Image (spheres, rainbow, N blue to C red):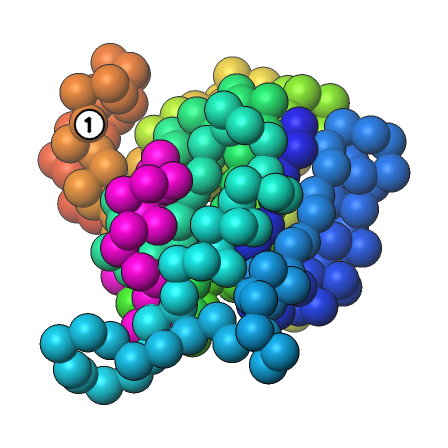
Amino acid sequence: MTVTILTLFPDLFAGYLGSSILARAIARGQVAVKAVDIRAFATDKHHVCDDAAYGGGPGMVMKPEPIAAAIEVACVPGQKVVYLTPAGRRFTQGVAEELAREQGFTLLCGRYEGIDQRVIDAFVTDELSIGDYVLSGGEVAAMAVIDAVVRLVPGVITGESLEEESFAQGLLEYPHYTRPEDFRGRRVPDILLSGHHEKIRRWRLQKSIEKTMKNRPELLDSPALPEEVRELAAEIVREGDGHGRDEGA
């Protein structure tokens, strides 16, 4: 997979691309990521990439010529061009899975009030938002998208780990524990020490449902949830919010 980032601030990505899982994936040749400086495609001596908006209003708008030139020179023809903007559709695990199936894609990072609409009309195939808030630019959003997508590329992370993460089954992930068994009077739930795999699986599913009910209850409205999840969720509701339930064998 090849990911191209179009940005006014390519240096922001140096540390990010050189660390952790992403760095290992790049070193193994599983993914290639390049950050392209849009300013390099501005033709005036000061490399100006923004101007005042037609019709007035506050802030500046990124000019179309440098962005168009960057796309035409630096991007792979036929691959998706994704504009990162608060006005885009919400980026979800499902969208990450869509992008992970691509051979590559381009992430276009806006700044200021955004980019000239004519670039969007001519080149952009998708617009994504990582949340209902406004950032100074698309660079942080690009890092989030790359991180979520690259870890889904086959071989980057084990399939078993991916299967039990939040959103993989439509629920938030259950809590995790490690050594020591007793940390400042807080013990690991007995059931996790029991060695009974089916009871552990059921306990983890229960905790996933409880966390989803608390933090993202709308996820439980999905018609794609397995029948076991629906039945256990109904049982939890009947018995209250789930707190104080037996965590033993």
Farthest residue in the top direction?
227
Residue that appears at 87% across and 38% down: 27
Residue that appears at 27% across and 43% down: 121
Q: Is residue 117 magenta?
A: yes
Is 142 in front, or is 42?
A: 42
Residue that appears at 67% across and 53% down: 35
Residue 213 lies, in percent from the top left, at 24, 45
Is residue 248 visible in the rendered structure shown here? no
Instruction: Assign a secondary structure to mark 1.
Output: loop
Residue that appears at 15% across and 38% down: 237
Query: 241 left or right of 93?
Result: left
Query: 37 left or right of 241?
Result: right
Is residue 222 visible in the rendered structure shown here? yes
Within 10 Å of disc 1 (Cα), the crowding (few <14, some 14-19, many 20+) is few
Q: Is residue 235 magenta?
A: no
25 relative to 110, above or below: above
Q: Which residues are magenta?
A: 112-132
Is 125 in front, or is 142?
A: 125
Residue 205 lies, in percent from the top left, at 41, 29
Residue 152 lies, in percent from the top left, at 59, 29
Residue type, label 1? Ser
11 relative to 78, above or below: below
Which residue corresponds to mark 1?
A: 222
Is 10 in front, or is 243?
A: 10
Residue 61 lies, in percent from the top left, at 33, 72
